[in-house]
Amino acid sequence: MPIFTQKKCPTCGGKLELISGNKYECRCCHNVYEMNEGNTSLYDSLQTASTFRESLNFKQAEMLYKNMLKKYANEDLSDVYWNLLLCEQRVMFETDQNGEQFPSFYDIVQTEIDESEYYSKAIEYAQEYDTNKLMCFVDLANKMQEAKNKYRTIKNTTKPYDIFICFKKSSLADPTKLTKDYQLAYDLYNHLSASYKVFFSERSLDNIVIREYEPNIYHALYTAKIMLVLCSDIDYLNSQWVRNEWSRFKMFTRTSAQAKSIIPIFIDGFAPEQLPDELRSCQGYNNDIYLMQKLGSAIKTIVNPVDKQAELAAKLKAEMEAKMQEQMAAQMEALKKQFANASQQDRVNTAPQSIAINSPTYLNTDKTKIEDKAFLDNKDLTSFDIPKGVTHIGIEAFQGCMNLRSITIPNGTTIIDNHAFRNCMRLIKIDLPSSIAEIGECAFYGCSGLRSISLPKGIKAIKQGTFYGCTSLKTITIPETITEINNLAFDGCENPLQIVFQGTKSQWDSIKKSCDLSNIRVQFAQNFIVPYGTTVIASEQLKDRKDLTNAIIPDSVWSIGSQAFAFCSHLSNIVIPDSVTSLGNSAFFNCSELKTVKLSSKLTVIWDNTFSYCGRLEKINIPDSVTKIGGGAFSCCHGLTDITLPQNVTSIEHDAFIGCDNLVRITIPKSVTEIGSQAFKDCRKLTNIKYTGTMNQWKAINKGGFWNSLTPKYTVYCTDGNIKKSLFSS
């Protein structure tokens, strides 16, 4: 659309207002333009060329501007040279909320603004014809150069982004009202930022001054490999900021050396046909219960997820080890000075001694306590068995025993005192007897080799610094007797550290009131025992029970309702007795820790989404009684590598195994007559399909659209030969 029709200034992009006759003034730079009818004036030609520049066809626009230099050689060419500069620099100007113009870059070219021939010429003509325009050019050029310089700083100091979320935050009808697009953007950010670096303006531009928005946005657009465009209203997509973002990203998909993709997300029935023409070719997804599943699969084809927890843990580990090295160096330096100033006899008396293990000198008189500092900084100690009868391990008893790899603590020991095993960096495992009732402050501080530990039931508090700097610690079992955990108890541990809490969720909630455990993932070791005599586990009866790890179902139960165990994210084991004949839709939906399942031998159907999003499900034996695998039944079961369908199955419905990206082998019986659409889509490791029928029987199976989309070149092994996947075989 022409500039004057849109009432935009050809110099700065500001809004033009009619002041008299055919003259328009820019509200931002106050330049005055005369609009003549026909296509004879310089301003008309500027108008035509700018339609190409605004559609991001910079080369075509540049050609038209250069033609103007010849055609209007005797006129003021300042605007022509200025627009050539904008084409060269790949810049458009936008108006911010304060009515000021800021540069929006579509590329960062090497040529600096003041080194450009076009800028020099624009200034030269403006000096001769219009001093107001001269000041405008200088101001806008300074903004452009400042943004370019800032971007270069950001490029060197900020990591590349993986995903850019493009959305309209405020309603056009009521700017105080947030859109549905914003809420979904917020949810997507929270979901994806655990594995990817995501640009979400609400968070990513927080604490950044407005004038630095553009270089930060450009960096995100330029580096991100995926843009999620949220679509609920066509007017939102065409609004200034939203269109600016997706149009720039769209251009980068054509010019960037790296693969970049735009994924529209349709909200509240928004139809793909409503998309702007530039986005019509993009594959989009509906905002439904499968959105995260589909996005996860799509994103992983382009961007490898980053284990941010592992990155942070590695960083903390490196910092802790560096700190320990500094401490050790300081101790050695102090020791050297001590020896240098001592007499020969003093050296004999003060040199570190390796205490004989069989000697009782490290014990108190009644041999019930290992004395304070008994083995302090003993580098020769590699293993130690504490004698029976010892009840107390003293302060700093084994501190600094950096080569200690194993230690046996006898039952009857009740106290591990402050700093007892501090900086025992090679201690990988320690078994605490059930008699332990107290563990002191910093008891295992700096035990960077310790991987897991189970605390006995007698302990009531985890004190300050107890496991500080245990950078390899991944899991810890905590008894229900614990009532207090100090804020600094787990600083510097694996992030997130997994706690297996042997109490209830309400007990844990009570503990959390006294400390900050935001970086700790908790698993509740609690069984759910269904009372004998129960016949039905109702729909949603146990839905979202985060405290449930095991479920014991008696053989009196015959029906498990839809979503009965859905979102039980810590449920790891369940046995479904043979009495169960009915298993409802989504019964175990998103039981993300579920690893093995034994199904009833009387089930005939595995209904829709029964095990969808059971990401760790590794093994499941499907009984011969089953005749149908429902839609999405095993979708996104990332742990599945091999599965055998029984001989009576006739139907594998839509999306049944979609997103099972580690599935390598599957056995399909000749009884199958139908494979639904996208049934094996995105099974990226599926190379071996064993079919118990002939090649002709395999070809006769009714297969839905995209049933094998995004699978590798698998082989179907039939009884009379093999069929390899190709563009033309099914």
Image (spheres, rainbow, N blue to C red):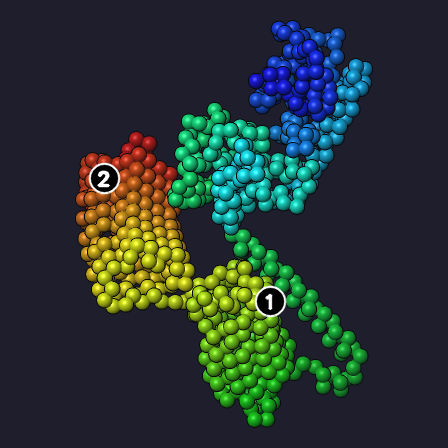
Left or right of 132? Residue 401 is: left
Q: Which residue is mark 2?
A: 674
Q: Is residue 316 visible?
A: yes
* Percent coordinates x, y for residue 558 in the rendering: 22, 59
Left or right of 683? Residue 422 is: right
179 lies above or below 388: above
Q: Could you classify mark 2 by the number of other residues whose Cα lies within 10 Å: few (under 14), some (14-19), or many (20 or more)?
A: some
Residue in front for this viewpoint, 476 or 722: 476
Sequence-wise, the earlier of marks 1 and 2 is: 1
Left or right of 134? Residue 554 is: left
Task: Describe the element under mark 1 as helix, strand or loop.
Answer: loop
* Percent coordinates x, y for residue 557 in the rendering: 23, 62
The image quadrant that residue 687 belongs to is top left
Q: Could you classify mark 1 by the number of other residues whose Cα lies within 10 Å: few (under 14), some (14-19), or many (20 or more)?
A: some
> Which label is found at residue 488?
1
291 lies above or below 511: above
Q: Please tell me which residue is depicted at 48% across the width and 39% down the height of the picture.
A: 180
